[in-house]
Image: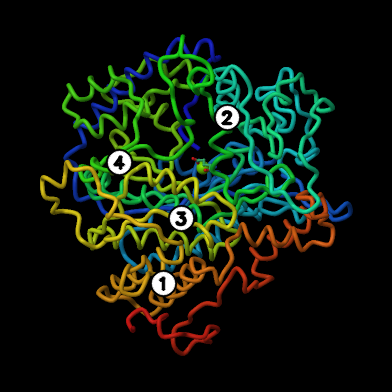
């Protein structure tokens, strides 16, 4: 979830006194990195995925599934080999690396080494994910499972953790009525410090209100009494009727996602890819939608996005525009976890139509020091935030060789994309991180999503594709993407001509505002699979690209399988995970048509997810059979358009 500095965390009162210092030195550090590394080039295309897992404890006797608070025990074991290698100064090839996440029921795993540019690495992705899952699963007893699941359905319901833990609405770091502090990862102070400081900066608890799914028997208006949970009136004021109310960082940062980081060959390619992928974020969010239930209630959204966004919203009333601006420096339209507000490549400039809040002094500092205005705007926008987690040992830094202050703000701006400068004195190049996707239940699905997006970046770079539309339209797409069943029913703004090339942009065009003719509205199916004679579609473009590259049989079959899966996922032949979960709940014998996901439903659902992930159950609504190389058992029927090199 970000920078893990060692040391003693400061209180919010102390932290705020260093805010200017940290911003000023953070930007100095960025200017230094930029000048040292702006001409760095010829880095290889490397990439890696990040998977976040939850750990679930099953009590079969009482038919209950709870989140297992054990990351503090499990992680040191998972990290043992890595730590040993670091201590001995050895260069050991590990197949996975493990990191803490926000909650004590979460862990995060990545491949031990980044993948390279050879296409046959696509054969390893799923295997690596499977081994990771195995490795983590081995740390748990037979009653518990490592599951890739975006938002645990009963997170925040009474006794949702194992062992059970009490909330502390008076002295707790989050003061939540629902999410106990024990569920926060205790092994690093970053997580509880962020929780407390975000709340204190805001001046009250975070307040998340997700529209509830109103079923036939949902009581209307849907309102809850929070007094028995210890509410002093804050929850009553903050909760909206007919919504699912949540009051802690853990409701969002306790969700899991699937991220992919790419190393670009140089800064320009990084900026180009950042922009192109920015326009695709809502599209991939929608097709990966996997979070239709919060705090034991079906929601009227399919995604985690708005929940995490609200869960770390540290803006004061003035900044949010609820009160007139007096003490605050700015009105800030969005939370620190939200979608990107500006493109950063030269070709993206004319599509930047969102008014951005920026720190003018820092902007000037960057521009005066030779950073182009557009990149400087991006950073000056991220740097309107205050630091929310500072360690006393890290306050005075060597700005030439350290980057903690820069990383402090960079890593607490959780946007759909992240543009990452190389760490100082390291072999790593300029990178971009693709962050919107929700995690799927199986390694197969996660591998398919990851491989799809990696392939797409290659196609974007090779064919110089252009997906840019005005940023305000990307923003509208983000809203559309989260709606219930948007993957099937949503209409998304999308660029009409994506293959016209990106390099030659006549100077008059460069400065002209984009015209409405450049984009239209499409469904997810049309975007992925194309509209005959009108729009090529992402999957056919990938297939075109693959026709011209040398593929061995194994890789070809792997890619055919994944692309076929993505094609069906986009066309609606396969369900989104969100739809599958909704159907499971709605068809459960215990479901009372009131939106409530009971203990028993939750237990059966988690058991079903575990069985699906283990491969014990093959559900044709979610999965497809694999394409096998000729001679091996064919467990899939091949249609003409499955054949990459064919038609
Ligand atoms: N778990 C967060 C999410 O679902 C991401 C945290 C991170 O940046 O690693 O988006
Ligand atoms: Mg993470």
Left or right of residue 455, residue 626 in this image:
right
How far separated are the C-alphas under marks 1 and 4?
A: 31 Å
Asked whether mark 4 lies closer than 8 Å to ligand 1, one says: no
Whichever of callouts 2 and 1 sits on the residue coming sooner in the sequence is: 2
Seen in the picture, residue 272 relative to 373 is either above or below; the reply is: below
Q: Secondary structure at mark 2?
A: helix
Disc 2 target residue:
191
Q: Are marks 4 and 3 in contact (CB under 8 Å)?
A: no
Quarter holding the C terminus is bottom left
Disc 1 target residue:
559
Whichever of callouts 1 and 4 sits on the residue coming sooner in the sequence is: 4
Q: Are marks 1 and 4 in contact (CB under 8 Å)?
A: no
Disc 4 target residue:
343
Q: Which mark is residue 524?
A: none
Disc 3 target residue:
284
How far separated are the C-alphas under marks 3 and 2?
A: 28 Å
């Amino acid at each position: 979830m970000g920078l893990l500095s060692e040391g003693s965390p400061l209180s919010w009162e102390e932290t705020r006194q260093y805010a200017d210092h940290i911003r000023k030195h953070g930007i100095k550090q960025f200017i230094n990195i930029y000048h040292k590394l702006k001409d760095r080039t010829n880095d290889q295309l490397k990439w890696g995925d990040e998977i976040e897992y939850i750990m679930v404890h099953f009590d079969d006797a009482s038919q209950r599934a709870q989140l297992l608070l054990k990351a503090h025990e499990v992680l040191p074991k998972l990290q043992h080999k890595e730590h040993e290698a670091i201590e001995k100064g050895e260069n050991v090839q590990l197949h996975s690396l493990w990191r803490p996440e926000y909650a004590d029921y979460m862990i995060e795993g990545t491949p031990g080494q980044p993948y390279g540019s050879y296409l046959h690495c696509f054969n390893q992705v799923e295997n690596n994910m499977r081994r990771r899952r195995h490795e983590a699963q081995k740390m748990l007893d037979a009653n518990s499972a490592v599951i890739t699941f975006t938002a645990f359905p009963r997170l925040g319901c009474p006794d949702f953790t194992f062992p059970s833990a009490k909330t502390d609405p008076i002295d707790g770091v989050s003061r939540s009525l629902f999410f106990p502090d024990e569920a926060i990862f205790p092994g690093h102070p970053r997580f509880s410090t962020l929780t407390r400081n975000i709340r204190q900066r805001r001046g009250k608890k975070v307040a998340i209100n997700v529209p509830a799914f109103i079923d036939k028997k949902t009581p209307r208006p849907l309102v809850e009494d929070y007094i028995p949970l210890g509410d002093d009136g804050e929850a009553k004021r903050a909760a909206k009727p007919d919504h699912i109310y949540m009051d802690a960082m853990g409701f969002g940062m306790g969700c899991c996602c699937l991220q992919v980081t790419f190393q670009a060959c140089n800064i320009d390619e990084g900026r180009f890819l950042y922009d192109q992928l920015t326009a695709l974020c809502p599209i991939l969010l929608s097709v990966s939608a996997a979070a239709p239930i919060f705090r034991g209630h079906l929601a009227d959204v399919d995604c985690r996005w708005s929940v995490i966004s609200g869960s770390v919203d540290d803006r004061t009333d003035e900044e949010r525009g609820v009160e007139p601006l007096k003490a605050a420096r700015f009105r800030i339209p969005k939370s620190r976890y939200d979608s990107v507000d500006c493109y950063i490549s030269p070709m993206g400039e004319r599509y930047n139509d969102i008014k951005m809040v920026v720190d003018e002094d820092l902007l000037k500092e960057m521009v005066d020091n030779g950073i182009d205005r557009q990149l400087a705007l991006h950073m000056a926008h991220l740097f309107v935030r205050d630091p929310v987690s500072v360690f006393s040992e890290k306050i005075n830094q060597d700005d030439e060789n350290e980057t903690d202050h820069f990383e402090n703000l960079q890593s607490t701006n959780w946007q759909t994309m992240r543009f990452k400068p190389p760490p100082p004195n390291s072999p790593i190049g300029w990178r971009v991180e693709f962050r919107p996707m929700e995690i799927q239940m199986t390694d197969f699905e996660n591998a398919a999503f990851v491989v799809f997006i990696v392939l797409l970046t290659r196609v974007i770079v090779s064919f110089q594709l252009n997906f840019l539309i005005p940023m305000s339209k990307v923003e509208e797409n983000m809203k559309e993407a989260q709606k219930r069943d948007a993957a099937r029913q949503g209409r998304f703004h999308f660029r009409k001509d994506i293959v016209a090339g990106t390099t030659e942009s006549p100077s008059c065009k460069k400065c002209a505002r984009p015209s409405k003719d450049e984009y239209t509205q499409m469904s997810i199916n049309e975007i992925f699979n194309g509209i005959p004679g009108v729009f090529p579609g992402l999957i056919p473009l990938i297939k075109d690209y693959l026709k011209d590259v040398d593929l061995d049989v194994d890789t070809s079959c792997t890619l055919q399988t994944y692309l076929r899966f993505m094609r069906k996922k986009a066309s609606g032949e396969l369900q989104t995970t969100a739809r599958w979960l909704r159907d499971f709940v709605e068809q459960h014998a215990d479901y009372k048509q009131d939106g409530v996901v009971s203990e028993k439903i939750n237990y059966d659902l988690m058991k079903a997810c575990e069985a699906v992930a283990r491969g014990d159950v093959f559900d044709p609504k979610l999965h497809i059979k694999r394409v096998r190389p000729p001679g091996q058992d064919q467990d899939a029927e091949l249609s003409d358009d499955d054949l990459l090199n064919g038609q």
